[in-house]
Amino acid sequence: MFDKKILITIPPYGAPKIEAEGFNGIGCAEATAAFEQALSGGAIENRTYKPEWSNPETGTEQEQEGLTW
């Protein structure tokens, strides 16, 4: 089983990015919701799902989604 992590990148210019690792399916969205709200007031500009996100039964998802504002 993979460790669960939330990675937040805040560049000097541009939008912050949140990435969830080690979560299954919708679990990544639930895990990142508070960070999304805190960093953007919940206004997501771009949400990217990785192929692993749509296959939760494998249990090997590492990076579920990347978010930018």
Image (tube, grey):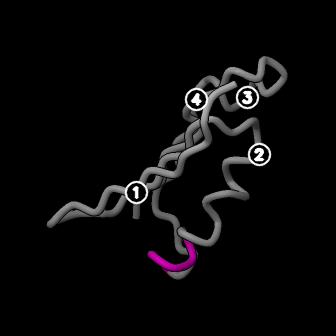
- Quadrant of the image for the C terminus? bottom left
Report which quarter residue 11 is drawn in: bottom left
Residue 39 located within the stretch drawn in magenta: yes
Magenta-tinted stretch: 36-40
Q: Residue at x 54, y 69 (%)?
A: 35
- Tell me the mark number nearer the camera, choosing from 4 and 2: 4
Q: CA distance from mark 2 to mark 1?
A: 18 Å
- Quadrant of the image for the N terminus? top right
Q: How many badges with numbers are in the image?
A: 4
Q: Which residue is mark 4?
A: 62
Q: Is residue 34 left or right of residue 58?
A: left
- Tell me the mark number nearer the camera, choosing from 4 and 3: 4
Closer to us: 37 or 8: 8
Element assignment for label 3: helix
Q: Position of residue 51 (x, y in %)?
A: 61, 23
- Give neighbour class at mark 2: few <14, some 14-19, many 20+ (Cα, 10 Å): few
Q: Position of residue 64 (x, y in %)?
A: 60, 37
- Tell me the mark number nearer the camera, choosing from 2 and 1: 1
Q: Earlier in the sequence, mark 2 or mark 1?
A: 1
Q: Which residue is mark 3?
A: 54
Q: CA distance from mark 4 to mark 1?
A: 15 Å
Q: Residue at x 67, y 57 (%)?
A: 31
Q: CA distance from mark 4 to mark 3?
A: 12 Å
Q: Position of residue 33 (x, y in %)?
A: 64, 66
Q: Are marks 4 and 3 in contact (CB under 8 Å)?
A: no
Q: Which residue is mark 2?
A: 26
The amino acid type, in three-letter code, at marker 3 is: Ser
Q: Earlier in the sequence, mark 4 or mark 2?
A: 2
The amino acid type, in three-letter code, at marker 1 is: Ile
Q: Are marks 4 and 2 in contact (CB under 8 Å)?
A: no
- Residue 35 vertical position relative to residue 2 in the rendered view, above or below: below
